[in-house]
């Protein structure tokens, strides 16, 4: 099931002392499936934040259609099924971590007090904040706030969650903890729409990526398909005449297959084929890298 479908999304703003119309989104279209982690990528100013704002009705598009859960536009029922972690969330600093989640859990109106207590305990443990449950948010570090923010986005058991830079500001342990949680909720059937500049994390987490460039979708598809499409560096280890050899190919998959065919004709024994291509390499090749 598609938890989100965006078709022909357009959005313009008027900027400057003498306002001039600037088109930010020029016909953006993509789909997000349930049970899948979809990365939403692009350079600064490409239109990622504007797209997310339009999806959540925080900004109103000039044209286009946005459909949730294959049913229709953003309704009250659809909102109940969506979780959101913005890039710069606001926190009530005088609340403790436990009180913060209780407030949002009660706000959703979905649980009894007993179920909500269990839900809060489970989420605090999953984001590794159980020991800090009674500490006020004003005393949380940036990484801890990021974790409690993700817990808040999940407190009402949504079917679809939008995460804007969820791993920013986290140390390696924190990124590992939240990465595992994001993988787990996708396995449980939740659709995850995941915007980030941390390409290494996106490559590890996402099955699919949507790349936006200059207000248009430049690529939509599997991460591995993108890496194959943009080519890269391949390392082939093989044995020929009893001697182990290594050959490096800088090119696409077609060139790799051609060389493999040569090795087979020479009756070589192929030990290993390894791709060193990364998502960052792919970005550079399609003109999105720094």
Image (tube, rainbow, N blue to C red):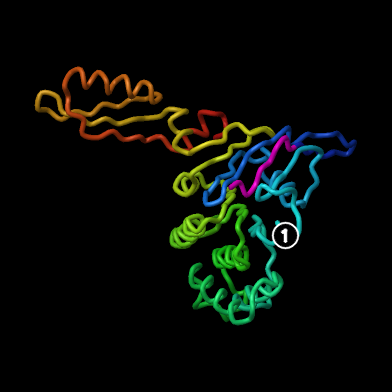
* Main secondary structure found in the magenta portion: strand
Q: Circle 1 sits on which residue? A: 77
Which sits in the foreground, 103 or 8?
8
- Magenta residues, as a range? 1-9
Q: Give the answer, above or below, for where 105 lies relative to 85.
A: below
Work out whether 192 lies above or below 235.
below
Q: Is residue 176 above or below residue 199?
A: below
Q: Is residue 138 visible?
A: no
* Quadrant where the image shows the C terminus: top right
Identity of the residue drawn at 55% across and 67% down: 144
Q: Nearer the viewer, residue 60 or 72?
A: 72
Q: Residue at x 27, y 20 (%)?
A: 261
Q: Specify whether residue 47 is in view.
A: yes
Return the x and y of residue 28 as percentages of the image width and height. 69, 36
Disc 1, SS: helix
Q: Magenta stretch: residue 125 in it? A: no
Mark 1 residue crowding within 10 angstroms, few (<14) / some (14–19) / many (20+): few
- Asked if residue 269 is positioned above or below residue 69 in the image, the reply reads above
Q: Is residue 272 left or right of residue 136?
A: left
Q: Quadrant of residue 228?
A: top left
Residue at figure coordinates x 57%, y 81% from the top left = 134
Quarter-of-image position of residue 100: bottom right
Extreme residue in the right direction: 18
Q: Is residue 2 magenta?
A: yes
């Amino acid at each position: 099931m598609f938890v989100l479908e965006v078709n022909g999304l357009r959005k313009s703003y008027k900027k400057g002392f003498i306002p001039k119309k600037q088109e930010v989104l020029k016909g953006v279209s993509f789909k997000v499936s349930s049970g899948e982690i979809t990365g939403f990528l692009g350079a600064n100013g490409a239109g990622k934040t504007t797209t997310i704002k339009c999806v959540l009705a925080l900004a109103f598009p000039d044209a286009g259609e946005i459909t949730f859960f294959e049913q229709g536009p953003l309704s009250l029922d659809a909102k109940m099924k969506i979780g959101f972690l913005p890039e710069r969330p606001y926190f009530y600093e005088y609340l403790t971590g436990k009180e913060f989640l209780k407030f949002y859990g009660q706000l959703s109106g979905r649980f009894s007090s007993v179920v909500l207590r269990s839900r809060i305990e489970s989420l605090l443990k999953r984001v590794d904040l159980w020991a800090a449950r009674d500490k006020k948010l004003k005393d949380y570090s940036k990484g801890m706030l990021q974790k409690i923010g993700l817990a808040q986005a999940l407190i009402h058991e949504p079917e679809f969650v939008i995460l804007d830079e969820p791993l920013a500001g986290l140390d390696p342990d924190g990124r590992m903890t939240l990465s595992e949680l994001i993988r787990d909720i996708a396995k449980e059937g939740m659709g995850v729409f995941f915007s980030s500049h941390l390409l290494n994390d996106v490559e590890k987490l996402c099955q699919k990526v949507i790349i936006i460039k200059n207000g248009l979708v430049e690529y939509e598809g599997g991460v591995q398909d993108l890496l194959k499409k943009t080519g890269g560096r391949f390392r082939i280890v093989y044995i020929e005449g009893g001697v182990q050899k290594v050959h490096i190919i800088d090119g696409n998959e077609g060139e790799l297959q051609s060389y493999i065919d040569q090795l087979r004709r020479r009756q070589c024994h192929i030990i290993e084929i390894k791709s060193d291509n990364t998502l960052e390499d792919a970005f550079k090749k399609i003109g999105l890298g720094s």
